[in-house]
Amino acid sequence: MTGWTVPPEAAGERLDRHVAARLDIPRNQVQHWIEDGLVQLNGRAAKPSAALAAGDRVECAPPEPKEERVLPEAGELNILYEDSALVVIDKPAGLTVHPGAGRSTGTLAHRLLDRYPEMAGVGGPGRPGIVHRLDQGTSGVLVVARTAGAYARLARAFAAREVTKRYLGIAYGAPSPATGTIEAPIGRHPQRRVEMTVRPGGRPSKTGYRTVAAQAGISLLEMDLATGRTHQIRVHLKHLGHPLVGDPVYGEARWKGLPRPVQAQLRDFPRPALHAWRLAFKHPSTGEPLSFEAPVPEDFGELWQAVTGEAALPTA
């Protein structure tokens, strides 16, 4: 059982949408949970469309995940590179990487098995070939292994921080200084267990950032992950006072303080504005340096234009 108190900025949201965003799972799955009585609002059953008020108590008891073998499923893959050892994917926002609580089908792992059946025996249970992951709402570069040897060597490279990971994000406000490093330990939130937070005793975490452009109340940031903690960029930017636009967990209702004509675009941006832009590592078989870049998604440019009036996103 997990539960939380609805914050003021979530007042008026639908119950199903709020829970889905909070737990980073598909909304239709949450609707099934509500219908099965696994989600309660203020201690009672409620409809998926129930409007929330600040201070409401939401409690959720997800069903125990089933130990099921991942089966191949057809689906689009945007492949940036492939060879006999690995595949590099440009993951779209909204696609879950592997099965987990609330998601047993329709993941990237299912699509990978359809195209690369040899991945079935690579990596951990339910995560064929998956060396690292991106949140469901994050788009961008992801590398997966096709062989057990490539998986082991890539996993060691990630653990040893030998992989360069650069992200782009659109955040509220303008960081000062414009370039800097956030070093703050991250751990599980003591009350809201589905969240991470900066806290004493957390795991050492380091994020470098550079402001590419800042205007009209938002900034385009380039970030370099020196460590790889859960939700690291999202937590660190909140800690810095400049949360990502569209972040349903670590974001804030900062759109309310910006001009009315742009409030709707910021309020309704459907995901954390975060993109895994570049990934660089040594090939697990040859040692050759490899570097990949996922094109900036269209929704970034559309958001920037809607808020700033500029026709194109600044060049990072």
Image: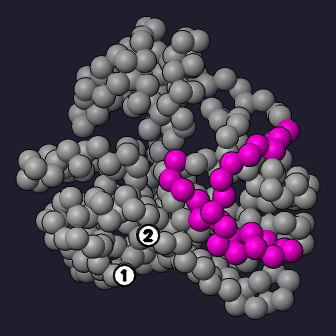
Name the residue type under label 2: Val
The residue labelled by disc 2 is 296
Q: Distance between the residues labelled 2 and 1?
A: 10 Å
Question: Could you tell me if residue 43 is visible in this image?
Answer: no
Above or below for 100 versus 115: above
Q: Where is residue 60 in the image (x, y as percent from the top left)?
A: 52, 23
The residue depicted at 44 percent of the width and 53 percent of the height is 197
The residue labelled by disc 1 is 316
Q: Where is residue 101 in the image (x, y as percent from the top left)?
A: 65, 35
Above or below for 264 versus 65: below
Question: Could you tell me if residue 182 is visible in this image?
Answer: yes
Q: Tell me which corner region of the image, top left, top right, bottom left or bottom right, holds residue 239.
A: bottom left
Labelled pair 2, 1 in contact (Cβ < 8 Å): yes
Q: Is mark 2 on a helix, strand or loop?
A: loop
Q: Give the range drawn in magenta.
A: 69-94
> Looking at the image, is mark 2 or mark 1 nearer the viewer?
2
Name the residue type under label 1: Ala
Relative to 266, 209 lies left or right: right
